[in-house]
Image: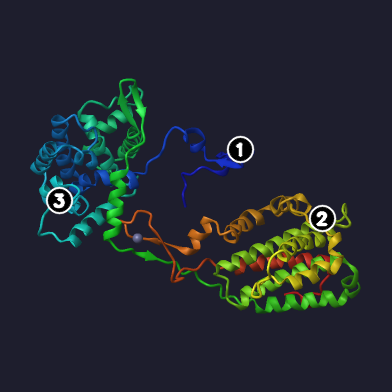
């Protein structure tokens, strides 16, 4: 569970825009365009990571710092040891830098990068570091391992790399640390010679990371430092090439099915509906209220039974099912609350529903009917005209009683039900990206495929079971029926 994230109350609500802005975006969103360490920056410094990985932290730090020190003295053309900046230099400068590197480390350590920096695109680098005796698989394995190590942006290893990223500026005397930040000064001075296990590192590491993160957006100009968008073309190229030469490692989650048997509950609920109908035949013959309560409860029961009988608890469709069950419960409770002030609310509710049907019917009449369509105008025609002639039915394009389901849930004291389930399941009903991602896209575990997701074309992944939540809502509905119709104890589940 993420602990260092803002709470909902820390976010800012812009009601007119319909936006809940995160605290960070609200204050800095227009100023800083964040780049991701892993996606945009890490590939640039991975060559230094290969050295640290090969020689271990102590020796690796000494070697990388020595070679960076020499590079800093050799050229003013680059301020960061970004591979793309080095690769952009002329052949002569590139060769000199590669020679500096190879006087401190064995060139074989850098060689895995030749699968990215190939002969066509970067011939000088390739000719210097290519080792014919190392197979593509070996190079890929080494790079893949390094990516795994240096990708988590707050890890000790990534922080080492982020420290080295600042070394050219450090050696050129271009890092100015304010007197008010003695900790940052100590961090830069002592970082390479302090073990990660030393307690002081717990304050050094964040200082290094934050200065590396802030630095990259700024360049020095005659008018002072200016914010520029970072060039991510090399990193984009790196991830694309790494992705194309290595296979996906997708995994799917198999959520357990709820093995409880709900058949008895469903059967008893069916008997209760039957009992209520028989016992209240006079109301059934004449009351809109009775129709709406018992009809809507039956509708919810049929959905629950369909999910149960077809073992759909782990499916996408069951999320739409439970959303509807919740909506039925909320609307019934809402109508019961409103009936005192609006006695005709039950009839209005039926007419509202039929108005919706009428709109679809009117549109359908203007088109050629398709025989296989699941909307059958003939049936809709009968239903719309059942209560009254359709010419007397208006079409209300808004929510029933002008309030959405959220407002209705608040009014009846069931906002938790809305917040926790209805809102979540609406994502599935509307096919929004959160639901698509959770249900239909698999994560790829290959560290060379940054944030890669793959369509679940074999339908290997399911979703957490909805049956318990369905049952809880159906039980609430049953309590509501019990209050209204005094169901005998012997019939209750
Ligand atoms: Zn992949």
Q: Residue at x 84, y 70 (%)?
A: 486
Q: How many marks?
A: 3
Camera-side residue: 357 or 420? Answer: 357
Q: CA distance from mark 2 to mark 1?
A: 31 Å
Q: Secondary structure at mark 3?
A: helix
Mark 2 beta carbon near ligand 1 (under 8 Å): no
The yes-or-no answer for disc 1 within 8 Å of ligand 1 is: no
Query: Residue 87 got which mark?
Result: none
Of labels 3 and 2, earlier in sequence is 3
Residue annotated with mark 2? 337
Direction from residue 410 to residue 187 in the image, left or right:
left
- Colour mode? rainbow
Q: Secondary structure at mark 1?
A: strand
Q: CA distance from mark 3 to mark 2?
A: 74 Å
Instruction: Give how far apart the Cα atoms at labels 3 and 1 are.
Output: 53 Å
Q: Residues at badges 2 and 1 in contact (C-beta under 8 Å)?
A: no
Percent across and percent down for residue 88 are 21, 39
Residue 466 appears anywhere in the view? no
Disc ID at residue 14: 1
Q: x%, y% of residue 328?
A: 72, 63
Choose the circle earlier in sequence order: 2 or 1.
Answer: 1
Residue at 33% x, 23% y: name it: 178
In which quarter of the view is residue 148 placed?
bottom left
Residue 15 visible, this angle: yes
| Front label number (2 vs 1) | 1
**Going by the image, does 366 lie left or right of 117?**
right
Please name the residue shown 18% across and 29% down the image: 76
Q: As drawn, is 284 to the left or to the right of 197?
A: right
Whether residue 203 is situated above or below residue 247 in the rendered picture: above
- Disc number for residue 109: 3
């Amino acid at each position: 569970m993420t602990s260092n994230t803002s709470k909902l109350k820390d976010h800012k609500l812009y009601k007119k825009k319909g936006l809940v802005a995160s605290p960070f975006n609200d204050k800095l969103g227009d100023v800083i365009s964040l780049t991701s360490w892993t996606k945009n920056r890490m590939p640039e410094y991975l060559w230094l990571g290969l050295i640290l990985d090969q020689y271990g932290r102590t020796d690796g730090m000494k070697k990388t710092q020595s070679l960076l020190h020499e590079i800093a003295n050799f050229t003013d053309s680059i301020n960061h040891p970004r591979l793309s900046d080095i690769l952009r230099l002329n052949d002569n400068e590139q060769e000199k830098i590669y020679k500096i590197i190879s006087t401190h480390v064995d060139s074989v350590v850098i060689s895995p990068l030749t699968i990215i920096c190939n002969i066509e695109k970067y011939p000088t680098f390739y000719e210097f570091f290519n080792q014919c005796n190392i197979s593509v698989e070996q190079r890929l394995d080494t790079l893949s391992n390094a990516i795994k190590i240096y990708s988590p942006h707050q890890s000790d290893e990534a922080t080492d790399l982020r420290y080295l990223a600042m070394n050219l500026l450090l050696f050129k005397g271009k890092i100015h640390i304010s007197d008010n930040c003695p900790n940052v000064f100590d961090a830069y001075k002592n970082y390479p010679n302090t073990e990660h296990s030393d307690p002081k590192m717990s304050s050094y590491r964040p200082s290094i990371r934050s200065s590396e993160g802030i630095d990259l957006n700024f360049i020095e100009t005659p008018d002072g430092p200016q914010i520029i968008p970072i060039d991510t073309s090399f990193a984009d190229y790196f991830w694309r090439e790494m992705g194309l030469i290595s296979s996906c490692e997708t995994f799917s989650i198999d959520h357990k099915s709820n093995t409880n048997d709900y058949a008895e509950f469903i059967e008893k609920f069916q008997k209760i509906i039957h009992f209520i109908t028989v016992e209240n035949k006079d109301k059934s013959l004449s009351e809109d209220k009775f129709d709406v309560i018992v009809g809507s409860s039956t509708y919810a029961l049929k959905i629950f039974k369909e999910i149960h009988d077809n073992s759909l608890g782990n499916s996408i469709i069951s999320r739409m099912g439970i959303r509807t069950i919740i909506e039925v419960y909320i609307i019934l409770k809402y109508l019961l609350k409103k009936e005192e002030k609006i006695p005709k609310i039950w009839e209005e509710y039926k007419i509202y529903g039929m108005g919706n049907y009428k709109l679809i019917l009117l549109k359908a009449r203007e088109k050629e009917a398709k025989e296989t369509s699941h909307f059958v105008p003939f049936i809709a025609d009968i239903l719309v005209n059942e209560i009254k002639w359709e010419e007397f039915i208006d079409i209300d394009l808004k929510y029933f009683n002008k309030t959405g389901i959220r407002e209705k849930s608040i009014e009846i004291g069931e906002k938790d039900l809305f917040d926790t389930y209805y809102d979540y399941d609406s994502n599935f009903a509307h096919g929004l990206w959160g639901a698509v991602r959770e249900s239909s896209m698999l994560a790829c575990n290959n560290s060379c495929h940054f944030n890669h997701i793959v369509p679940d074309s074999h339908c290997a992944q399911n979703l957490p079971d909805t049956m318990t939540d369905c049952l809880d809502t159906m039980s609430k509905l049953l309590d509501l029926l019990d209050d209204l119709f005094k169901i005998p104890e012997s019939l209750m589940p």
